[in-house]
Image (spheres, rainbow, N blue to C red):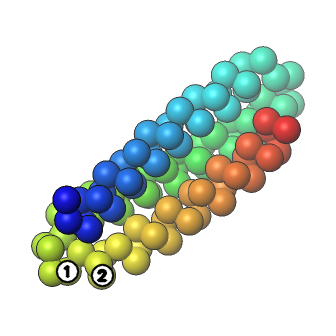
Amino acid sequence: MDEKTAYEEKLQARLDEWKADIAKLQAQAQEAQADARLQYENQIEELEKQREAVKAQLEKVEQAQQAAWKDVKEGADQAWNTMNEAMQRAFNRFMS
């Protein structure tokens, strides 16, 4: 397996994990009081937007030619880091 394919698989696996994590937050939101539910829903909406940004970056990596994919990887890494930080903040805030 080449480095590009390994990166794509790693990013796709993380996207799947984030989808499951967002589902956990959605389940938690269903049990929350009205004011807390709104906070959950706002956070979930933001996480879903960020997840879509990472997904778009993955698509760019997948479409990039072998010689140029590392240039595209930088944007994917930034989106990855932003999403990872947002997910950690959400879980620290709502799941603690």
Residue nearer the viewer, 9 or 37: 9
Q: Is residue 54 above or below residue 66?
A: above
**Residue 73 position within the rendered picture, expressed as x and y whole percent measured from the top left:** 35, 73
Residue 80 lies left or right of residue 1; in this view the side is right
Q: Name the residue at 15% across, 81% down.
A: 67
Quarter of the figure with residue 96: top right
- Count of labels in the image: 2
Q: Is residue 11 above or below residue 94?
A: below
* Residue wearing tag 1: 68
Q: Are marks 1 and 2 in contact (CB under 8 Å)?
A: yes
**Residue 23 position within the rendered picture, expressed as x and y whole percent measured from the top left:** 58, 29
- Residue found at the very far top of the displayed protein: 31
Q: Is residue 62 in sight in this rendering?
A: no
* Residue wearing tag 2: 71
Q: Which quadrant: the N terminus?
A: bottom left
Task: Tell me the SS state at disc 2.
Answer: helix
Q: Amino acid at mark 1?
A: Ala
